[in-house]
Image (spheres, coloured by chain):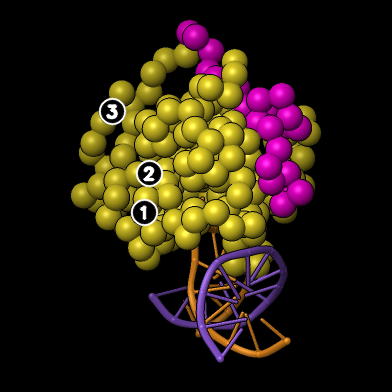
Chain colours: A yellow, B orange, C purple
Amino acid sequence: MSARLFAGPVVDLARELVGWTVAYGGVSGRIVETEAYHDSEPACHAYVGRTRRTEVLFGPPGRAYVYRSYGIHALLNVVVEPEGVGAAVLLRALEPLDGVELMRMRRGLERQEDLCSGPGKLTQALAIDLELNGSDLIGGPIRLAPPDRSADRVPMAVGTRVGITKAADLPWRFCEAESRFVSRPWPPGDRARRAA
DNA sequence: CATGGGATTGACT
DNA sequence: GTCAATCCCATGC
């Protein structure tokens, strides 16, 4: 696996990354929800161009973009598209796999559905913080890995991104349609579309 | 240097 | 349903 895998269009990669696993410090989960962000649209941090904050977004694909949200949470993104393009896939929810007890301790909650069902929750469960910003996601401390070749392709749901005010109409959110571990239910009109 | 705005979450009415 | 916590960083003076 090489970083070239992540050089493709961000919307395709956001869909593709559902089903991959993320592992860090012996704890891991399977990605069940993602969103795409691209410097051409104003919801993306990279919309403002290259700054100290967005430097990682414009850098080579396959690295982590971790930033602090609302002063409290760390949010984890996968930087994609070629160097010079500011784009990333936000990881919004995981299905817990390894280290579930550690996740419970870190989150102070028991229910498995509550451990990683949100972008701030999953970084807390995995203990991912800002110091990992810019780190390599292939050979680095955080490891991203593709699903088994034998893994079934699951129905996908597509919708609009959560929690943004600008470019809120773009259908750039992807989830495993029937997962119990997504960050929030789909609005009634939004759920039907499939892209298996 | 001061200000304002979040890609959220959990507690509370 | 409402709302506050809290910090990084871009922007503007």
The residue identified by callout 2 is A173
Q: Which residues are magenta?
A: A128-150
Which quarter of the picture shows residue A64? top right
Q: State the residue in front, A170 or A115.
A: A170
Q: State the residue in front, A7 or A127.
A: A7
Which quarter of the picture shows residue A134? top right
Residue A181 visible in image: no
Tag 1–tag 2 contact (CB < 8 Å): no
Q: Quadrant of the C terminus of chain A?
A: top left
Q: Secondary structure at mark 1?
A: loop
Question: Mark 1 belongs to which amino acid?
Answer: Glu
For residue A195, the mark is 3
Q: Secondary structure at mark 2?
A: strand
Residue A124 visible in image: yes
Task: Answer few, some or many: residues within 10 Å of disc 2's Cα (few below 14, many 20 plus, some between 14 and 19).
Answer: many
Task: Give me the residue at 35% from left, 63% from top.
Answer: A166
